[in-house]
Image: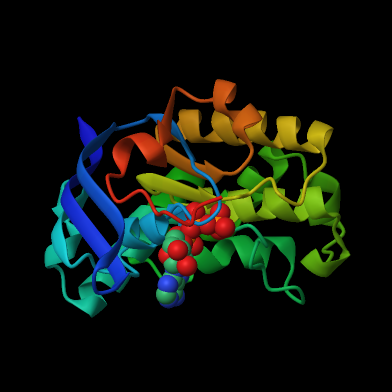
């Protein structure tokens, strides 16, 4: 079953200069997709359309069976909190909070994810701890460190735990490895893929780094799926 569907989606920041023009794209439930394209080709714009932060000028985007392009802004916000987990390039963790509190935050904005976390682990705190331990952060968790005292690779693993708590249908990762060295990067990607597989979440990961492609089920090249083909992409 398709988890993400784009149908005749067109978006332009300025009239007459389309950045996204995707006639058709389907991503199946549980697929691990690598989205690649040069700088300026529209990767971030596409992610913002998929999460409903931007609305296309025309066309339809469906996530987990819901047409997000038909929702009101507040419905889209709620849908995003319930169904989409994010991993950002710069993590976007709250530095003064503990590891557990950072992870639990995702459930504060979504009753659905909170209920799933409780059903899976007994409580949201236990679900957060379980994920952090699976991701190799037991020592840092027990010391109750603020995330500001973690290494870059450790912070990125906290960001993964936050994105995964309450098992969202779709996980979106925007250049999540750009701050990691090669060895940490490979370990991180393997761990991320293991965790999303366990939850049967669909993963969409964007990166400039083409050497990540072999880790994924499928690579979507913006050049191939996007007819807009931004002329200034490098
Ligand atoms: N807020 C904005 N306002 C106007 N134009 C924008 C805006 N954001 C991006 N663009 C334009 O849209 C095009 C695609 O940008 P986008 O950021 O989606 O590319 P990208 O592939 O994510 O690039 P990078 O890999 O460098 O982050 C570029 O031509 C860019 O100038």
Whole-percent x, y for residue 182 in the image: 80, 34
Q: Residue furthest front?
A: 231
Give the vertical position of 151 relative to 34 (above or below): below
Q: Is residue 6 left or right of residue 177?
A: left
**Between 110 and 80, which is closer to the camera in this rendering?**
80
Residue 218 picture quarter:
top left
Residue at x 24%, y 74% (from the top left corner): 15
Q: Is residue 107 visible?
A: no
Q: Is residue 189 left or right of residue 199?
A: right
Whole-percent x, y for residue 124 in the image: 52, 58
Q: Is residue 172 visible?
A: yes
Q: Is residue 167 left or right of residue 65?
A: right
State the colouring used for the structure image: rainbow
Whole-percent x, y for residue 93 in the image: 66, 67
**Between 14 and 24, which is closer to the camera in this rendering?**
14
Residue at x 11%, y 65% (from the top left corner): 70
Whole-percent x, y for residue 183 in the image: 82, 31
Residue at x 21%, y 72% (from the top left corner): 75
Question: Which quadrant holds the N terminus?
Answer: top left
**Between 149 and 172, which is closer to the camera in this rendering?**
172
**Between 151 and 60, which is closer to the camera in this rendering?**
60
Give the vertical position of 218 relative to 27 (above or below): above
């Amino acid at each position: 079953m398709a988890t993400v569907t784009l149908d005749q989606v067109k978006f332009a920041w300025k009239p007459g200069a389309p950045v996204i023009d995707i006639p058709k794209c389907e991503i199946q439930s549980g697929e691990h997709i690598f989205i690649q394209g040069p700088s300026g080709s529209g990767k971030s714009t596409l992610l913002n359309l998929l999460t409903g932060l931007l609305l296309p000028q025309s066309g339809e985007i469906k996530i987990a069976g819901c047409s997000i392009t038909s929702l009101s802004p507040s419905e889209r916000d709620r849908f995003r909190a319930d169904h989409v987990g994010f991993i950002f390039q710069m993590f976007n963790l709250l530095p003064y909070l503990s590891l557990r509190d950072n992870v639990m935050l995702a459930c504060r904005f979504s009753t659905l994810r909170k209920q799933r976390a409780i059903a899976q682990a007994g409580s949201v705190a236990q679900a957060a701890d379980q994920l952090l331990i699976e991701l190799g952060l037991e020592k840092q968790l027990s010391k109750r460190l603020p995330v500001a005292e973690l290494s870059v690779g450790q912070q990125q693993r906290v960001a993964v735990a936050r994105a995964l708590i309450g098992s969202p249908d779709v996980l979106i990762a925007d250049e999540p490895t750009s701050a990691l060295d090669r060895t940490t990067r490979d370990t991180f990607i393997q761990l991320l893929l293991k965790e999303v597989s366990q939850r049967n979440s669909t993963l969409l990961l964007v990166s400039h780094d083409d050497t990540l492609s072999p880790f994924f089920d499928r690579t979507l090249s913006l050049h191939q799926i996007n007819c807009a083909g931004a002329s200034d992409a490098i």
